[in-house]
Image: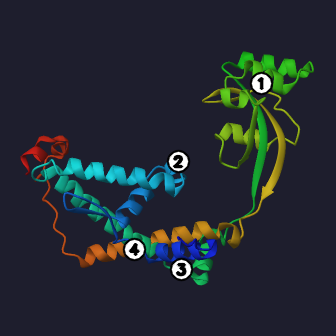
Amino acid sequence: MIRTLPAAALMAGLSTMAAAQQASDVVATVNGTEITLGEMIITRSQLPQQYQQLPPETLFQGILDQLVQQQVLADTVEGVPARVELALANQRRSLLAGEAITEMMGEEVSDEELQAAYDEAFADAEATNEYNASHILVETEEEAQAVLERLEAGEEFAEIAKEVSTDPGSGAQGGSLGWFADGMMVQPFQDAVAALEKGETTETPVETQFGFHVIRLDDTRTQEPPTLDEVREDLASQIQQQKIEARLEELEAEAEVTRPEEGAFDPSVLTNLDLLEEGN
């Protein structure tokens, strides 16, 4: 008589079995070539995100089948082509370089480094003016003057913008440009906006290289420099990147590197795939 294990004991046994598994465990063999659990894990990690979201029980057999089929096909190739060897060398170099960078990126950035970077970037920063404005852009001064007359007659700015503005982005939004800071717009436009009071519209058309604008200032605000906490992550990434660049310079200086003399290679040779077939 077969004795049924309690559910808790069965789950404990499965958990122990799963915990005992290692990346080196052989899942299958093809003509004597081993396919390991680690190779399957790597394959899954490199799948597009939509496939990685599938449950493991769905992926396991599919990944195994894929690796078996690849090995069966690989076994039909007699001798490794030069282009494959070269690609493998590049891939190995790239993966190892990625590991080195990952290790560097894992180094913590100290509070002192963050503070120094913040002070350098924002110590002398002042509050900036930001504007929320709308405009109607047309090709000629006469068209712009006609827009001003329609506004004077009581027509809605947004409706006119949707009808006649040649700026498709803002025109569809009733002319709204959203928020922008000093210096973000071309100078004649920026000067005209800065001279307006909230709710005012330019009395005359404003000419820029884009055409003629009728501008309305919808709102203003003062933007204070960001706090350290607000830019902490950006600064940390910047510091880490600087460290990587400095380390690369250091490593290159220490390494024995030889480069070709100028003119030794014709740059167009990079497109000559026939060289790969020759194995040179």
Residue 202 left/right relative to 188:
right
Which-is-in-front pick, marks 1 and 4? 4
Q: Residue at x 55, y 79 (%)?
A: 109
In the picture of the structure, the residue carrying the numbered disc 2 is 50
Q: Are marks 3 and 1 in contact (CB under 8 Å)?
A: no
Alpha carbon separation for disc pair 3 and 1? 52 Å
Crowding at dot 3, Cα within 10 Å, few <14 / some 14-19 / many 20+, comes out as: few
Q: Amino acid at mark 3?
A: Glu
In the picture of the structure, the residue carrying the numbered disc 1 is 161
Q: Earlier in the sequence, mark 1 or mark 4?
A: 4
45 or 257, nearer to the observer: 45
Q: How is the image coloured?
A: rainbow
Alpha carbon separation for disc pair 3 and 2? 32 Å
Which-is-in-front pick, marks 3 and 4? 4
Q: Where residue 59 appears, x then y in whole percent?
A: 46, 53
Q: Where residue 55 appears, x then y in whole percent?
A: 54, 54
Residue 240 left/right relative to 212:
left
155 or 29, nearer to the observer: 29
At mark 4, the secondary structure is loop
Q: Are marks 3 and 4 in contact (CB under 8 Å)?
A: no
Question: For residue 22, which numbered disc appears in the image?
Answer: 4
Q: Where residue 123 appears, x then y in whole percent?
A: 66, 72
Crowding at dot 2, Cα within 10 Å, few <14 / some 14-19 / many 20+, comes out as: few
Alpha carbon separation for disc pair 3 and 4? 30 Å
Q: Earlier in the sequence, mark 3 or mark 2?
A: 2
